[in-house]
Amino acid sequence: MMDSKQLDAQVSVSAEPALDEMATLAKAGVEVVVCNRPEQEAEGQPSFAELEQAVAAEGMTFVAIPFSRGQMQPAHSEAFAKLLSSGKKVHAFCRTGNRSCNLWAAAGCLNSADKKLLQQAAQKAGFDISGVLVTY
């Protein structure tokens, strides 16, 4: 069962949802589903094509901004920041949700968000973004 954490009014994150949980995201008003793990990161994970199909079947858009643990680059944060500027409700996931939360924080820094508020929201959701806040 997906344990979704709301980071702010626009963004929620989780560990990888099952394909049949995409309907739950759609019902929650999510418009864009972002995958932050590389394809075939672990055995048994659905392919990007399978994810895209499941997401599209529920009327949402699938976006892949994949990177391995500890490998987040400025291009990743810029892509996510640009996506957030659309104003659409976003759900991002990776294996545990941690990468997605750090990406959200980095994008927030790029969009001039208050770092203290980012830190509080991440901590409330159970994630540590201190490394991102130092970098950005």
Image (cartoon, helix red, strand yellow):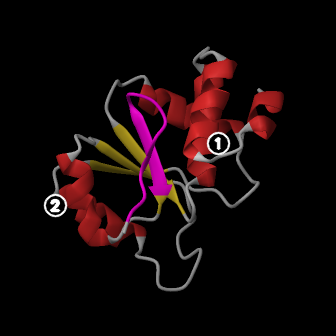
- Residue at left offset 43%, top offset 32%: 83
Residue 3 lies, in percent from the top left, at: 43, 58
Observer able to see residue 53: no
User: Is residue 28 found left or right of 64 in the rendered image?
Assistant: left
Q: What range is drawn magenta here?
A: 2-14
- Answer whether residue 64 is magenta in the image: no
- Residue at left offset 37%, top offset 39%: 90
Q: Residue furthest front?
A: 124
Amino acid identity at mark 1: Asn
- Residue at left offset 16%, top offset 60%: 57
Q: 78 or 97: nearer the eye?
A: 97
Q: Residue furthest bottom?
A: 43
Q: CA distance from mark 2 to mark 1?
A: 28 Å
Q: Secondary structure at mark 1?
A: helix
Dot 2 corresponds to which residue?
Answer: 57
Residue 56 lies, in percent from the top left, at: 21, 56
Amino acid identity at mark 2: Ala
Observer able to see residue 78: yes
Q: Residues within 10 Å of mark 2 (few under 14, many from 20)?
A: few
Residue 20 lies, in percent from the top left, at: 24, 70
Pointer 2 or 1: first along the chain: 2
Dot 1 corresponds to which residue?
Answer: 102
Q: Quadrant of the N terminus?
A: bottom left
